[in-house]
Image (cartoon, rainbow, N blue to C red):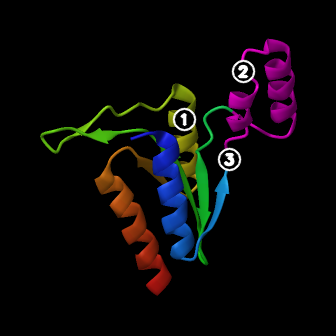
Amino acid sequence: MKEHDIQKRIVSCLRRLGCITICTDMYLPLMFFGKNQKARLSYISYAKGQGADSGVSDLVAITKKEAIFIEVKKWGIGKTGKVIGRTKQSPEQINFQKTVEERGFKYFLINDPEVETELYNYINKIATE
């Protein structure tokens, strides 16, 4: 399953659960620049000036009580029913996760359906407290 499709589903579910969702991927527009290296470099410089950093989670979900950081990685379900094709976090993403958790925030690495379900259960739990 493509990361983009997983993220769209997560955003839809989070919004139904009453969360504000923020996509933090300022590099997403690079896909529209094609092979125009000058434009790509110009946009990267612009994005960094606007606060874009490597390693930042894909999404931030804001509930009534807290902010939750969410990194989405692609995965699929094989013929045997097991999760396959997971991508890994970059060193910058691992460092960002560590920093976020050290500051007391919740961080979810969505790399299989069970973790995605854990995210929804966690949000439902804090919504009813």
Front of the two marks 1 and 3: 3
Residue type highlighted by circle 1: Gln
Look at the numbered disc 1 and give the secondary structure of its residue: helix
Who comes first in sequence, dot 3 or dot 2? 3
Cα distance between the residues tagged 3 and 2? 21 Å
Front label number (3 vs 2) = 2
Q: Main secondary structure of the magenta part?
A: helix
Q: Residue furthest bottom?
A: 128
- Estimate the spatial distance between the alpha carbons at disc 1 and disc 3, rounded to whole Å: 13 Å
Q: Where 27 sits versus 36, above or below?
A: below
Q: Between residue 106 and residue 15, name the one nearer to us.
A: 15
**In contact (CB < 8 Å): disc 1 and disc 2:** no
The tag on residue 24 is 3
Give whichever of discs 1 and 2 has the lower sequence position. 2
The amino acid pointed to by label 3 is Thr
Residue underneath mark 1:
93
At horizontal 45% and vertical 39% (from top left) the residue drawn is 2
Q: Residue at x 58, y 39 (%)?
A: 96
* Secondary-structure class at tag 2: loop
Q: Which residues are magenta?
A: 25-53
Q: In this view of the protein, which residue sits in the foreground, 108 or 79?
A: 79
Q: Earlier in the sequence, mark 1 or mark 3?
A: 3
Mark 1 vs mark 2: give the one in front.
2
Residue at numbered disc 2: 34
Looking at the rendered structure, the number of numbered marks drawn on it comes to 3
